[in-house]
Image (spheres, grey):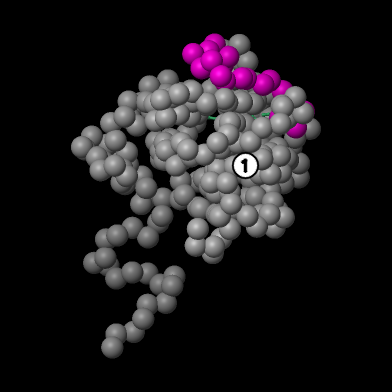
Amino acid sequence: MSEIEEPGEQPPRKDRRPRDPDLWIHGSIKKHRHADALHFRPDNDFFRLADPIVRSQRTLLGYDRLYVFWQAVRNVANVPGAVAEVGSYRGGSAYFIASAFARRTGEEVPMHVFDTFEGHPQQAITEHDEFQTTGQFSATTYDDVREYLSAFRRLEVHKGDVSASLGDLGEAVYRLVHIDTDLYQPTIVCLRYFGSRMSPGGVIVLDDYSSTKCPGVPMATFEYLEERRDFQIWDMRSGQLMLVKGCPPGSGA
Ligand SMILES: C[S@@+](CC[C@H](N)C(=O)[O-])C[C@H]1O[C@@H](n2cnc3c(N)ncnc32)[C@H](O)[C@@H]1O
Protein backbone atom coordinates (compact mmCIF):
# COMPACT_ATOMS: atom_id res chain seq x y z
CA MET A 1 0.00 0.00 0.00
CA SER A 2 1.40 3.40 -0.94
CA GLU A 3 1.81 6.05 1.70
CA ILE A 4 -1.03 8.56 2.07
CA GLU A 5 0.05 12.08 1.10
CA GLU A 6 -0.06 14.54 3.99
CA PRO A 7 -2.08 17.71 3.30
CA GLY A 8 0.27 20.53 2.37
CA GLU A 9 2.84 18.30 0.68
CA GLN A 10 3.70 19.17 -2.90
CA PRO A 11 1.96 16.95 -5.50
CA PRO A 12 4.14 14.73 -7.74
CA ARG A 13 5.57 16.69 -10.70
CA LYS A 14 3.51 14.80 -13.29
CA ASP A 15 0.20 15.89 -11.66
CA ARG A 16 -0.59 19.07 -13.61
CA ARG A 17 -3.82 19.97 -11.84
CA PRO A 18 -3.28 23.34 -10.18
CA ARG A 19 -3.34 23.39 -6.40
CA ASP A 20 -3.97 27.13 -6.32
CA PRO A 21 -7.81 27.42 -6.05
CA ASP A 22 -7.74 30.76 -7.90
CA LEU A 23 -6.64 28.87 -11.00
CA TRP A 24 -9.60 26.50 -10.86
CA ILE A 25 -12.23 29.12 -11.60
CA HIS A 26 -10.25 31.42 -13.89
CA GLY A 27 -9.16 28.46 -15.99
CA SER A 28 -12.63 27.13 -16.48
CA ILE A 29 -14.19 30.53 -17.28
CA LYS A 30 -11.61 30.96 -20.05
CA LYS A 31 -12.04 27.46 -21.40
CA HIS A 32 -15.82 27.67 -21.74
CA ARG A 33 -15.92 31.28 -22.95
CA HIS A 34 -17.08 30.48 -26.48
CA ALA A 35 -18.20 26.90 -26.08
CA ASP A 36 -21.74 25.71 -26.51
CA ALA A 37 -21.90 25.51 -22.77
CA LEU A 38 -23.47 23.00 -20.48
CA HIS A 39 -26.17 24.52 -18.33
CA PHE A 40 -23.95 24.81 -15.25
CA ARG A 41 -21.16 26.59 -17.11
CA PRO A 42 -21.07 30.24 -18.23
CA ASP A 43 -23.18 30.37 -21.39
CA ASN A 44 -23.55 32.93 -24.14
CA ASP A 45 -26.44 34.66 -22.34
CA PHE A 46 -24.13 35.30 -19.43
CA PHE A 47 -21.39 36.76 -21.60
CA ARG A 48 -23.86 38.87 -23.62
CA LEU A 49 -24.82 40.59 -20.40
CA ALA A 50 -21.40 40.68 -18.73
CA ASP A 51 -19.26 41.75 -21.72
CA PRO A 52 -20.47 45.36 -22.13
CA ILE A 53 -20.43 45.95 -18.38
CA VAL A 54 -16.90 44.64 -17.96
CA ARG A 55 -15.65 46.48 -21.07
CA SER A 56 -17.19 49.80 -20.00
CA GLN A 57 -15.24 49.57 -16.71
CA ARG A 58 -18.44 50.18 -14.78
CA THR A 59 -17.48 47.39 -12.39
CA LEU A 60 -14.35 46.25 -10.62
CA LEU A 61 -15.71 42.69 -10.63
CA GLY A 62 -14.36 40.19 -13.13
CA TYR A 63 -16.28 37.47 -14.97
CA ASP A 64 -15.77 34.96 -12.16
CA ARG A 65 -17.48 37.20 -9.58
CA LEU A 66 -20.28 38.21 -11.95
CA TYR A 67 -20.88 34.53 -12.66
CA VAL A 68 -21.53 33.96 -8.96
CA PHE A 69 -24.44 36.43 -9.28
CA TRP A 70 -25.65 34.78 -12.46
CA GLN A 71 -25.97 31.53 -10.50
CA ALA A 72 -27.35 33.20 -7.37
CA VAL A 73 -30.12 34.91 -9.36
CA ARG A 74 -31.22 31.56 -10.78
CA ASN A 75 -31.18 29.96 -7.34
CA VAL A 76 -33.29 32.68 -5.68
CA ALA A 77 -35.72 33.11 -8.60
CA ASN A 78 -38.56 31.60 -6.53
CA VAL A 79 -37.49 33.02 -3.17
CA PRO A 80 -39.65 35.97 -2.10
CA GLY A 81 -38.10 39.34 -1.40
CA ALA A 82 -36.26 42.39 -2.64
CA VAL A 83 -32.60 42.78 -3.65
CA ALA A 84 -29.94 45.11 -2.25
CA GLU A 85 -26.42 46.12 -3.14
CA VAL A 86 -24.23 48.07 -0.73
CA GLY A 87 -21.17 49.64 -2.39
CA SER A 88 -22.14 50.14 -6.02
CA TYR A 89 -19.33 52.57 -7.00
CA ARG A 90 -19.91 53.12 -10.76
CA GLY A 91 -23.05 50.95 -10.89
CA GLY A 92 -21.82 48.01 -12.96
CA SER A 93 -22.46 45.21 -10.48
CA ALA A 94 -25.93 46.62 -9.68
CA TYR A 95 -26.69 46.79 -13.42
CA PHE A 96 -25.59 43.19 -13.86
CA ILE A 97 -27.72 41.91 -10.96
CA ALA A 98 -30.83 43.88 -11.98
CA SER A 99 -30.52 42.73 -15.63
CA ALA A 100 -29.86 39.14 -14.62
CA PHE A 101 -33.14 39.09 -12.68
CA ALA A 102 -35.02 40.57 -15.64
CA ARG A 103 -33.51 38.00 -18.02
CA ARG A 104 -33.69 34.94 -15.83
CA THR A 105 -37.08 35.51 -14.14
CA GLY A 106 -38.83 37.59 -16.83
CA GLU A 107 -39.51 40.45 -14.44
CA GLU A 108 -37.76 43.17 -12.51
CA VAL A 109 -37.43 42.84 -8.75
CA PRO A 110 -37.48 45.72 -6.25
CA MET A 111 -33.83 46.66 -5.68
CA HIS A 112 -32.04 49.07 -3.35
CA VAL A 113 -28.57 50.33 -4.26
CA PHE A 114 -26.39 52.16 -1.71
CA ASP A 115 -23.21 54.20 -1.93
CA THR A 116 -21.84 57.52 -0.71
CA PHE A 117 -20.81 58.23 -4.34
CA GLU A 118 -17.95 60.13 -2.68
CA GLY A 119 -15.84 57.11 -1.75
CA HIS A 120 -15.24 55.63 1.69
CA PRO A 121 -16.68 57.93 4.37
CA GLN A 122 -14.20 58.91 7.08
CA GLN A 123 -16.47 57.82 9.93
CA ALA A 124 -16.80 54.29 8.49
CA ILE A 125 -13.05 53.56 8.52
CA THR A 126 -11.88 51.77 11.68
CA GLU A 127 -8.60 50.33 12.93
CA HIS A 128 -9.56 47.11 11.09
CA ASP A 129 -9.28 48.86 7.71
CA GLU A 130 -5.59 49.71 7.65
CA PHE A 131 -5.27 49.62 3.84
CA GLN A 132 -8.39 51.70 3.09
CA THR A 133 -8.51 55.50 2.94
CA THR A 134 -11.15 58.21 3.18
CA GLY A 135 -12.48 59.14 -0.26
CA GLN A 136 -11.21 55.96 -1.95
CA PHE A 137 -13.54 55.09 -4.89
CA SER A 138 -14.72 58.67 -5.37
CA ALA A 139 -14.48 58.55 -9.19
CA THR A 140 -18.26 58.31 -9.52
CA THR A 141 -21.35 60.45 -8.98
CA TYR A 142 -24.91 59.83 -7.86
CA ASP A 143 -26.32 61.49 -11.00
CA ASP A 144 -24.25 59.38 -13.35
CA VAL A 145 -25.14 56.08 -11.64
CA ARG A 146 -28.81 57.07 -11.32
CA GLU A 147 -28.87 57.73 -15.07
CA TYR A 148 -26.99 54.50 -15.88
CA LEU A 149 -29.53 52.47 -13.86
CA SER A 150 -32.58 54.45 -14.98
CA ALA A 151 -33.96 51.62 -17.15
CA PHE A 152 -34.82 49.67 -14.00
CA ARG A 153 -38.15 51.04 -12.80
CA ARG A 154 -38.15 49.27 -9.47
CA LEU A 155 -34.57 50.17 -8.53
CA GLU A 156 -33.85 52.91 -5.97
CA VAL A 157 -30.43 54.53 -5.53
CA HIS A 158 -29.61 55.74 -1.99
CA LYS A 159 -26.81 58.27 -1.61
CA GLY A 160 -24.91 58.52 1.68
CA ASP A 161 -23.44 56.40 4.44
CA VAL A 162 -25.43 53.15 4.40
CA SER A 163 -25.57 53.13 8.20
CA ALA A 164 -27.85 56.19 7.93
CA SER A 165 -29.66 55.20 4.71
CA LEU A 166 -30.89 51.90 6.14
CA GLY A 167 -33.14 53.88 8.50
CA ASP A 168 -35.07 55.22 5.47
CA LEU A 169 -36.04 51.74 4.24
CA GLY A 170 -39.49 50.36 4.90
CA GLU A 171 -39.71 46.88 6.42
CA ALA A 172 -39.11 44.22 3.77
CA VAL A 173 -37.68 40.77 3.24
CA TYR A 174 -34.74 40.14 0.90
CA ARG A 175 -33.69 37.35 -1.44
CA LEU A 176 -30.26 38.58 -2.60
CA VAL A 177 -27.90 41.07 -0.95
CA HIS A 178 -24.46 42.06 -2.24
CA ILE A 179 -22.18 43.71 0.34
CA ASP A 180 -19.12 45.27 -1.30
CA THR A 181 -17.80 48.11 0.85
CA ASP A 182 -14.29 46.76 1.66
CA LEU A 183 -14.75 48.03 5.24
CA TYR A 184 -15.46 46.47 8.64
CA GLN A 185 -18.13 48.82 9.97
CA PRO A 186 -20.60 48.98 7.06
CA THR A 187 -20.12 45.23 6.53
CA ILE A 188 -21.16 44.29 10.06
CA VAL A 189 -23.99 46.87 10.04
CA CYS A 190 -25.36 45.43 6.79
CA LEU A 191 -24.94 41.81 7.89
CA ARG A 192 -26.96 42.54 11.02
CA TYR A 193 -29.60 44.54 9.16
CA PHE A 194 -30.13 42.29 6.14
CA GLY A 195 -29.21 39.01 7.83
CA SER A 196 -32.35 39.02 9.95
CA ARG A 197 -34.50 40.05 6.97
CA MET A 198 -33.41 37.35 4.52
CA SER A 199 -36.07 34.95 3.28
CA PRO A 200 -35.25 31.24 3.78
CA GLY A 201 -33.06 30.31 0.82
CA GLY A 202 -32.01 33.94 0.34
CA VAL A 203 -28.35 34.67 -0.35
CA ILE A 204 -25.87 37.26 0.93
CA VAL A 205 -22.73 37.66 -1.18
CA LEU A 206 -19.76 39.31 0.56
CA ASP A 207 -17.12 40.67 -1.79
CA ASP A 208 -13.41 40.76 -0.97
CA TYR A 209 -13.86 38.30 1.84
CA SER A 210 -10.42 36.84 1.12
CA SER A 211 -8.62 40.00 0.01
CA THR A 212 -5.56 40.85 2.11
CA LYS A 213 -6.38 44.54 1.44
CA CYS A 214 -9.75 44.26 3.19
CA PRO A 215 -9.13 42.53 6.55
CA GLY A 216 -12.20 44.25 8.01
CA VAL A 217 -14.51 42.19 5.77
CA PRO A 218 -13.64 38.68 7.10
CA MET A 219 -13.42 40.13 10.60
CA ALA A 220 -16.99 41.48 10.39
CA THR A 221 -18.15 38.23 8.80
CA PHE A 222 -16.67 35.96 11.47
CA GLU A 223 -18.10 38.21 14.17
CA TYR A 224 -21.54 38.03 12.59
CA LEU A 225 -21.40 34.27 12.06
CA GLU A 226 -20.63 33.85 15.77
CA GLU A 227 -23.93 35.64 16.46
CA ARG A 228 -25.99 33.74 13.88
CA ARG A 229 -25.88 30.04 13.11
CA ASP A 230 -28.66 29.89 10.53
CA PHE A 231 -26.60 30.36 7.37
CA GLN A 232 -24.84 27.91 5.12
CA ILE A 233 -21.35 29.25 4.34
CA TRP A 234 -19.92 28.89 0.83
CA ASP A 235 -16.41 30.10 -0.07
CA MET A 236 -16.74 30.68 -3.82
CA ARG A 237 -12.94 30.79 -4.42
CA SER A 238 -13.53 34.00 -6.37
CA GLY A 239 -12.85 36.26 -3.39
CA GLN A 240 -16.55 36.14 -2.49
CA LEU A 241 -18.24 34.42 0.45
CA MET A 242 -21.84 33.33 0.02
CA LEU A 243 -24.20 32.93 2.99
CA VAL A 244 -27.42 31.02 2.38
CA LYS A 245 -30.20 31.71 4.89
CA GLY A 246 -32.17 29.01 6.64
CA CYS A 247 -29.77 26.18 5.93
CA PRO A 248 -27.40 25.90 8.92
CA PRO A 249 -23.99 24.32 8.23
CA GLY A 250 -24.22 20.55 8.47
CA SER A 251 -28.02 20.52 8.31
CA GLY A 252 -27.96 18.59 5.05
CA ALA A 253 -30.57 21.00 3.70
C1 LIG B 1 -15.02 48.35 -4.01
S1 LIG B 1 -16.18 49.62 -4.25
C2 LIG B 1 -17.59 48.79 -4.90
C3 LIG B 1 -17.35 48.17 -6.26
C4 LIG B 1 -18.59 47.88 -7.06
N1 LIG B 1 -19.50 46.94 -6.43
C5 LIG B 1 -18.23 47.40 -8.44
O1 LIG B 1 -18.90 46.53 -9.00
O2 LIG B 1 -17.26 47.92 -9.01
C6 LIG B 1 -16.64 49.97 -2.59
C7 LIG B 1 -17.70 51.04 -2.47
O3 LIG B 1 -18.22 51.05 -1.15
C8 LIG B 1 -18.63 52.36 -0.85
N2 LIG B 1 -18.76 52.51 0.61
C9 LIG B 1 -17.81 52.29 1.55
N3 LIG B 1 -18.31 52.53 2.77
C10 LIG B 1 -19.60 52.91 2.60
C11 LIG B 1 -20.64 53.29 3.51
N4 LIG B 1 -20.45 53.31 4.82
N5 LIG B 1 -21.85 53.63 2.98
C12 LIG B 1 -22.05 53.60 1.64
N6 LIG B 1 -21.10 53.25 0.75
C13 LIG B 1 -19.90 52.90 1.22
C14 LIG B 1 -17.52 53.22 -1.46
O4 LIG B 1 -17.97 54.54 -1.69
C15 LIG B 1 -17.20 52.45 -2.74
O5 LIG B 1 -17.86 52.99 -3.86
Image quarter where ligand 1 lies: top right
Residue, disc 1: 198
Up the image or down, 59 lies above or below 187; here it is above
Up the image or down, 163 lies above or below 159; here it is below
Observer-nearest of 131 and 153: 153
Q: Give the range drawn in magenta.
A: 145-164
Which image quadrant for residue 118? top right
Label 1's element? strand
Up the image or down, 246 lies above or below 11; here it is above
Q: Which amino acid does label 1 sit on?
A: Met
Image point 49% across, 13% down: which residue?
Answer: 151
**Magenta span includes 149:** yes
Image point 43% across, 72% down: which residue?
Answer: 7
Image point 50% across, 46% down: which residue?
Answer: 239
Judge whether residue 161 can be spotted in this image: no
Observer-nearest of 36 and 3: 36
Q: Is residue 83 left or right of residue 13?
A: right
Judge whether residue 194 can be spotted in this image: yes
**Label 1 C-beta lies within 8 Å of the nearest ligand 1 atom:** no
Q: Is residue 84 left or right of residue 34?
A: right
Which image quadrant for residue 70? top left
Q: In this view, does 152 lie to the left or right of 165?
A: left
**Magenta span includes 14:** no
